[in-house]
Image (spheres, rainbow, N blue to C red):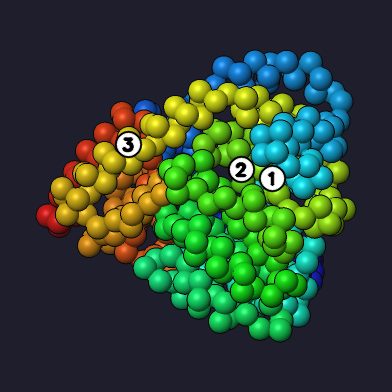
């Protein structure tokens, strides 16, 4: 007889629920015997892999018998060059999720509170809960972060604040002015994580000069990723920029080889492929407008987004719409777990993928209305 392992798990972990990822394409293939599936569920880059990344990966193949560079020297150097920062400010992660978790594990104890916004990225409450700390979800304003309310939520026990800009899954966006004003009011011993996973998709003139704030706010940590605009979600590589003393702490806690050799090489190649990034952002801008026009024309509500996804508000049951779309070979993302009970999130794909989605959605809504 086995013992009660649930009772043995630490209290925070007992309250956890597994992360609900977007449904994988081959899972739907297996379940429904469909082909030509369109997956618009995980905010991945629909453009495929760039040539420079492909070449870098092929070159790495012969070396996989060796451990990767534990310090990611070349990738940190490439990032440092890109942003004109010292390499000592960077922490690399197995996706930026890894870095988000490292930050929480390094600085937060069960005695602390962690502040995030209602409808914000689910990893924030997840890492907080795993530690057994208290998560404080501040009610959203217009689906996004209510910064004054988040400031007001700070107590003596607050150790960490997570802010996603743009936010996933709502796509909402905070201006540089609002963020800067917020940072000036946060106590110096409260760490602010500014999660900029979708930074590259934001119009240049709206992008916050957040990196220039690092010298003024030593409690600021900026996280970014190669999973979205750079198209490397499957390789798992992201990073943070922070005060070197914070990077030093994170570097002690992380796994020695948290970024594998393919991820390191591909990320470095992706950084040099300006054409791929430009094309990715241009496609997203163009197709986001196509989808927005479609939603408006069809009277389907949506939350305006600065990311590579749009969250729609439906009058029909979103779970039923999700299931019906699956049967038509289109995977979108349910977001009820984010407290978005009337919504579905759709990632912005290629013109063809979006066309397939729009046709399928129209057909599904008509079918459901007829029932
Ligand atoms: C996708 C996403 C990330 C990054 O995920 P990784 O693949 O782990 O880099 C981080 N934050 C938000 C808000 C995201 O949507």
Percent position (x, y) of residue 346?
37, 47
Residue farthest to the left, as pictured: 370
Which element type, helix, strand or loop, lies under badge 3? helix
Q: Earlier in the sequence, mark 3 or mark 1?
A: 1
Q: Earlier in the sequence, mark 1 or mark 2?
A: 2
Residue 133 in view in this figure: no
Quarter of the image with the N terminus in it: bottom right
Q: Residues within 10 Å of mark 3 (few under 14, many from 20)?
A: some
> Given contact means CB atoms under 8 Å apart, are the residues at marks 1 and 2 in contact?
yes
Which residue matches tag 1? 239
Q: Which mark is residue 287?
A: 3
Quarter of the image holding residue 294?
A: top left
Residue located 80% across and 57% down the image: 246
From mark 1 to mark 2, how far is it between C-alphas? 6 Å
Q: Residues within 10 Å of mark 1 (few under 14, many from 20)?
A: many
Which element type, helix, strand or loop, lies under badge 2? strand
Between residue 191 and residue 364, name the one nearer to us. 191
Which residue matches tag 2? 225
Q: Earlier in the sequence, mark 2 or mark 3?
A: 2
The yes-or-no answer for disc 3 within 8 Å of ligand 1 is no
The yes-or-no answer for disc 2 within 8 Å of ligand 1 is yes
* Image label count: 3
Residue located 72% across and 26% down the image: 265
């Amino acid at each position: 007889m086995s013992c009660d392992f649930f009772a043995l798990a630490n209290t925070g972990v007992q309250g956890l629920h597994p992360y609900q990822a977007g449904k994988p394409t081959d899972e739907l293939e297996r379940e429904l015997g469909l082909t030509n599936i369109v997956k618009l569920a995980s905010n991945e880059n629909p453009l495929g892999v760039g040539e420079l990344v492909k070449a870098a990966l092929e070159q790495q193949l012969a070396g996989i018998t060796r451990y990767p560079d534990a310090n990611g020297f070349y990738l940190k150097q490439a990032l440092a060059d890109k942003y004109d920062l010292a390499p000592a400010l960077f922490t690399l992660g197995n996706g930026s999720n890894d870095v988000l978790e490292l930050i929480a594990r390094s600085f937060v104890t069960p005695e602390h509170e962690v502040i995030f916004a209602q409808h914000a990225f689910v990893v924030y409450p997840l890492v907080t809960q795993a530690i057994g700390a208290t998560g404080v979800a501040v009610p959203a304003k217009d689906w996004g972060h209510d910064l004054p309310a988040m400031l007001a939520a700070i107590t003596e026990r607050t150790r960490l604040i997570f802010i996603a800009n743009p936010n996933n899954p709502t796509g909402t966006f905070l201006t540089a002015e609002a963020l800067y004003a917020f940072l000036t009011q946060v106590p110096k011993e409260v760490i602010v994580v500014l999660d900029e996973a979708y930074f590259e998709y934001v119009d240049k003139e709206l992008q916050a000069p957040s990196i220039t704030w690092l010298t003024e706010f030593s409690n600021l940590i900026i996280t970014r990723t190669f999973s979205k605009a750079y198209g490397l979600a499957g390789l798992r590589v992201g990073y943070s920029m922070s005060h070197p003393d914070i990077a030093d702490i994170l570097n002690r806690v992380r796994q020695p080889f948290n970024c594998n050799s393919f991820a390191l090489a591909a990320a470095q190649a992706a950084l040099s492929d300006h054409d791929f990034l430009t094309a990715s952002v241009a496609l997203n801008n163009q197709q986001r407008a196509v989808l927005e026009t479609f939603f408006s024309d069809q009277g389907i509500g949506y939350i305006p987004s600065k990311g590579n996804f749009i969250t729609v508000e439906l009058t029909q049951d979103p779970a039923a719409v999700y299931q019906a779309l699956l049967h038509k070979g289109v995977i979108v993302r349910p977001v009820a777990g984010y407290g978005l009970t009337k919504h579905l999130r759709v990632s912005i794909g290629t013109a063809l993928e979006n066309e397939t989605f729009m046709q399928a959605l129209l057909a599904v809504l008509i079918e459901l209305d007829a029932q």
